[in-house]
Image: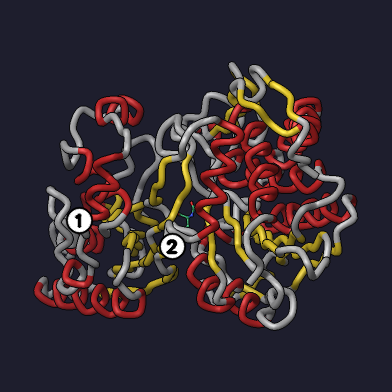
Amino acid sequence: MFPINVYVQLCGLLNCISVPFSEHILLEYVDSHQEEYVQTLRDWVAVESDSSDVLKRPDCHRMMDMTAEKLRAMGGKVELVDIGVQELPNGQTVDLPKVVTAQFGSDPSKQTVCVYGHVDVQPAKLEDGWATDPYNLTDIDGNLYGRGASDNKAPVLAWIHTVEAYQDLPVNVKFIIEGMEETGSNGLDAMIMAQRDSFLSDVDYILISDCGWLSRRPALTYGTRGNCYFFAEVEGPKQDLHSGVYGGTVIEPMTDLIGILDTLISPSGKILIPGIREAVAPLSDEEWKMYQDIEFDIESYKSKIGVSQLMYNNKVDLLAHRWRYPTVTVHGIEGAFSAPGTKTVIPAKVIAKFSIRQVPNMDPAVVKKQVTDYLNSVFAKRKSPNKLKVTMVIGAKPWLADTKHPLYEAGKAAVKRVFNVEPDLIREGGTIPIAKTFEDVTGKSIIMLPIGGFDDGLHSQNEKMSRYNYIEGTKLFIAYLHEVAHLKKN
Ligand SMILES: CC(C)C[C@H](NC(=O)CN)C(=O)O
């Protein structure tokens, strides 16, 4: 593969850079299979594999079967690993989607990479404000709209197509594809630990493509924030009450709940929970300089998300608070009246959902105690007869890599080869719950190689993946495996 003596000039295809001849064949293969790749993405997006809704669990199981089937049809050694059950708040249990593992090649003289990804998605409904049916992949001006298109179905498929395109893989490739990432990767930690000395024993590097670029410039990602996700439940009367009949006589659960939520973070973004800010690793001069050197336009960021004002007005503060400082977000309140119309009710029980994106050197177990103790003390001051219960339902750790690792040099070379630019080195404000576990359990290094666009609308209305990123991203993965093959084997 990739003989170094035969070169062709590929204008348009590779931004007019010289590339080796057989690479040209591979990349042409990708271009000529473009429609097939889009159709497979359409088939995958059509499956409503929303892991947060237990009623959609059959779709999640079907999604895992489809993934396994695709990998099996390519000749992979595939397994569907049972990772047990999920306990629901009402005490019932439901089967977790099985995890797909696959192996292509076992040549001991080659490097072995393990690609991790997920095929579950966040919830989406047309009435949330989507312009098109979220489960019918729709191509508008070269953008492929659909739930899960960018997060994470197209990147997973791009890796699969990469393996499919190579007739002779330059490295051994393993896959771990799960179906619970969007709810915190339930059951995956235990599976990774159990497979440390078997499936994972010969893995040299872990590759993850579950994030996006910062701008139109391709990027390599070296850090993710963690996520501690909480439920705060306030329970009062035994059933909902008429606010005219009972209002003014009962201490309302919603008033208590809003009151304590308002003590989590100040309007200017300062986290008010004692101990949280003190744990954060200080910003080093080197980091400051890295952020300073990144091209990032605050005005276009504002216009992209449709706001007139941000928390910070300078690039370094903005990037730092997006990537490497914690934040609190209140996501919603279960039990609250939220339908259109004017129901005059006092909800009897309300459950707030909020999460803290945490960063080095915060620890989810410590955060759990800090938040629980704080909310209990704030609630106690209200002298309310209602009952407060705080639970942490996700405790995903942050992850940070060394950008001097050869994996990143390989990433830079692959980006240069396909896009003819230097990539941005960026962090990600979101969370890949399993990343830190992978690293801790295997002792192997991870690179995050995003192909998603900066404006893909992840978790939001009108999520999309551009054809350009999907197809050129596949070429990037092809080039990346070639680069990894040339790293010194440990
Ligand atoms: C723990 C979260 C639900 C994980 C989620 N991850 C991603 O979106 C990555 N694709 C997140 O909200 O960050």
Please report the residue visible at 77 percent of the width from the left and 37 percent of the height from the top: 40
Residue type, mark 2 in image = Ala
The picture places residue 356, in percent across and down from the top left corner, at 31, 62
Left or right: 4 as drawn, with respect to 119 = right
Q: Is residue 138 left or right of residue 211?
A: right
| Relative depth, front residue between 13 and 131 | 13
**Residue drawn at point x = 32 percent, y = 39 percent:** 294
Q: How many numbered tags mark residues here?
A: 2
Residue type marked 1: Asp
In the rendering, which numbered label is found on residue 204? none
Q: Nearer the viewer, residue 97 or 92?
A: 97
Q: Is residue 235 left or right of residue 134?
A: left
Which quadrant of the figure has residue 420?
A: top right
Horizontally, residue 337 falls left or right of residue 439, namely: left
Badge 2, how many Cα within 10 Å: few under 14, some, many 20+?
A: some
Sort mark 1 into few (<14), some (14-19) or many (20+) by Cα contacts within 10 Å.
Answer: few
Check the image and report above or below for 485 versus 479. below
- Viewer-proximal residue, 34 or 38? 34
SS type, badge 2:
loop
- Mark 1 or mark 2: whose residue is earlier in sequence: 1
Above or below 254: residue 147:
above
* Quarter occupied by the N terminus: top right
Report x, y in % for residue 387.
27, 75
Q: Residue at x 32, y 52 (%)?
A: 323
Query: On residue 285, which mark appears?
Result: 1
Q: Is mark 1 within 8 Å of ligand 1?
A: no
Residue 30 can be seen in this image: no
Nearer to the camera, 232 or 324: 324
Residue located beneath label 2 in the image: 401
